[in-house]
Image: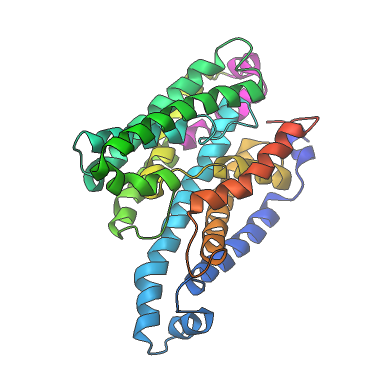
Amino acid sequence: MSKAAKQARLPLASALLWVSAALALLCIASLLIGAGEVGILRSLSALVGATDDEARFVLVELRLPRTLLGVLVGVALGAAGVVLQSATRNPLAEPGLLGVSAGASFAVVLAISLGASAATLNLGVAVGGAMVGCLLVLLVTQVRGVGDDPVRLVLAGAAFSGILTAISTLILLHDQRSSDEIRFWIIGALAGRPQDVLTWSAPGLLLGLLLLTPLIRPLAALALGEKMATGLGHHPGLTRLGALLGVAVLVGTATAAAGPMAFVGLVVPFVARRLVGPDIRRTIGLSLLLGPIIVLFADILSRLLVSPYELPIGVVTALIGAPVLIAVVRSHRLPTL
């Protein structure tokens, strides 16, 4: 029996079953729960066919697209987090912490400030910005004393994110038009997005997953060390580059669709490893379900915590993820990847 199998907490099939059930319940809850006047009972009545035009409008036109977008963003960030941690062999690697999301957001802010339309260019621009962030991560991991130290790598990523966020803020302060168009990207939000977001973001998600699929086995070999991976016929450099390209597409798509959401890519791998063990061949499938669970749970909390108003979902994901980050940093033994 492999080391990964011995460390698995649950059989993969059982974990997938329980997590799938939890996701289904959260999807239903996302349709029924809101901060407005249409409460759970009215929503449930409309869901089973009652003639309540207002409740039906809220369910079909507002909450259903919001729920589907939450699932899409969760899948993208969950898969990106698992792959990024495997590619860097760092349990603290997360798109929001390492500057990948900040790169995507900055690219969108810059493009709109130069006259681009948020409705037409945000996806491609965000993916390009995320790709630059990923390349920076790849360069930083090659710096002696940084790439081998999880905390130093996160500090380097945080510094990069801080610089880009500061520049983005300056741009928005001096350009009111850009501020009006882009402010939802800065805080992260599922609400208020047009339904056509699902149309153009779904292909981005599919492309990112297709890019990562052939890299699962090489990434699993890379977890054994570069020499072992090379001995098994893989190319660690190309594997990392391909993985970061897929991560850039996923993170850019999620950021363009809903803005930056920190810590989702940290919490998902953390939970997945404790459910089924560290092998990416087991965690990657589970991450596709855990990601939407984290995002939808945060979105539901955002509707309830300050009802009848809503919190930005990016604030809630930070509240969920920050304790996980502290727990990993304070751990005497970082999780094995």
| Outermost residue toward the left in this view | 115
Residue 12 showing in the rendered view: yes
Q: Closest to the observer: 302 or 218? A: 302
In percent of the image, x 38 and y 37: which residue is there?
105
Q: Is residue 137 above or below residue 63?
A: above
Along the horizontal axis of the image, is 283 left or right of 215? Answer: right
- Helix, strand or loop for the magenta stretch, by majority: helix
Q: Position of residue 26 (x, y in %)?
A: 56, 65
In percent of the image, x 55 and y 22: which residue is there?
156
Along the horizontal axis of the image, is 146 left or right of 40? Answer: right
Along the horizontal axis of the image, is 81 left or right of 57? Answer: right
| Outermost residue toward the top in this view | 144
- Tell me the quadrant of the picture where the N terminus can be found: top right
- Reply yes or no: does residue 228 show up in magenta: yes
Q: Say which quarter of the image contains residue 169.
A: top left
Q: Closest to the observer: 302 or 210? A: 302
In percent of the image, x 41 and y 46: which residue is there?
259
Q: Position of residue 277 (x, y in %)?
A: 72, 41
| Residue stretch in magenta | 212-232
Q: Position of residue 308 (x, y in %)?
A: 49, 70
- Reply yes or no: does residue 168 show up in magenta: no
Q: Say which quarter of the image contains residue 120.
A: top left
Q: Position of residue 286 (x, y in %)?
A: 60, 48
